[in-house]
Amino acid sequence: MDLIFGFLQNTGFYNLTFGNLLMIIVGCALLYLGIRKGYEPLLLVPIGFGVVIGNIPYSSAMPLGVYDKGSVLYYLYFGVQKGIYPPLIFLGIGAMTDFSALLSNPKLIALGAAAQMGIFITFLGALLLGFTPAESGSIGIIGGADGPTAIFLSSQLAPHLLGAIAIAAYSYMALVPVIQPPIMKLLTTSQERKIHMKPSRQVSKLEKILFPVVSFIICAFIAPGAIALLGMLFFGNLLKESGVTERLANSARNALIDIVTVLLGMCVGASTQAQSFLNHKSLGIFVLGAFSFAVATASGLLFARFMNLFLKEKINPLVGAAGVSAVPDSARVVQIVGQKEDPGNFLLMHAMAPNVAGVIGSAIAAGILWSMLSPK
């Protein structure tokens, strides 16, 4: 009977808390959104299942969770905790990204920069709500709509908030098709949404090769803290555009990024153990994250309208919403919203310019925040 009672004490049923049950329901909800609704399944399915894994109760005598030194999950989570996985994801993103749209219309870089206002406004908002400067910087980066960047900065400045920040960042990335359209319609007129833009010019191979090298040098000198992210992003792009390393580029944009995405998503989900995740700070992070994302979207839209005051060839303001770095989802949303107004209007390639500029901009913002807020 003692053996049987000891076995029962070690089961998940015996150790289950209301918090664990609530988080398991949240994990199942993420799985539903990823599988049934198709919202970023490559992100939400690993994260959702990770949330379920992380909230199965177990005896404290057994090291099983991501925070239990010596467990398998602890060593897998090491890549999240130390910021190893995000640069590897950036390598894959670089290897699959075509910067032609950006190179053919460089003025659209400004829209990617304008969208980063969400990061810094939310940073100030988090300070006012009582978060520390390091915590506020980590929360603000959610506005960049870039999960790997949010994880990287949080791992350096606020590792104790990493789980909540990562879940918030990826959740809002997945909900881009839900969050952005109402803001886009609110801040633009029907006539503006019907603006047609000139087709992109042909970009030479030399431009494509020089861009990652020159851009990395400039960005790295501006924000050395972004070297790991931008170095991998531009290196991956050089592998793609050089024409002599196709095998490496193919590995980076397929096998490597898939493996790292699975590990990152699952480990981030598993880090949301109810005992450490369910608190007032997590709720504040989700509220601030939504605010940050909305401000970033609005900033890109409004700055596009501002630019049109001075431009002869008008920009469709919708492309400003793609300044958040949720690649390529926000660009697709621009295309969908634009075609609802005018089925003959094709904005996807134009929207990709501020979209990829947003990836670079959010990484630079993270580097600046890290250099400003890290302990001296």
Image (tube, rainbow, N blue to C red):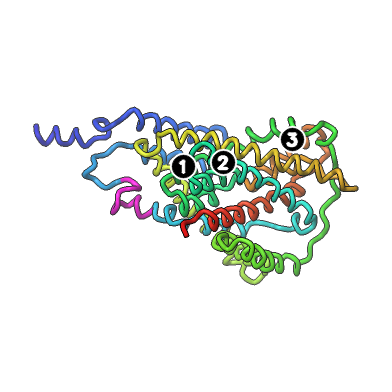
Q: Which span of residues is magenta-colored?
A: 65-76
User: Judging from the image, what secondary structure is the residue with disc 1 in?
Assistant: helix
- Examine the rendered structure and indicate whether residue 181 appears above or below residue 211: above
Relative to 313, is 77 on the left or the right? left
Q: Residue furthest bottom?
A: 244
Q: Is residue 212 magenta?
A: no
**Which numbered disc covers residue 193?**
none
- Examine the rendered structure and indicate whether residue 325 appears above or below residue 279: below
Relative to 88, is 359 on the left or the right? right
Q: Which residue was labeled with disc 1?
A: 47
Task: Give the residue at x 35% y 48%.
Answer: 66
Taking depth in this image into account, of 164 and 253 the one nearest to the observer is: 164
Neighbours of disc 3 within 10 Å: few (<14), some (14-19), many (20+): many
Q: Residue 220: where, in percent of width, then height?
A: 61, 64
Q: Are the residues tagged 3 and 1 within 8 Å (C-beta)?
A: no
Q: CA distance from mark 2 to mark 3?
A: 19 Å
Q: Is residue 48 visible?
A: yes
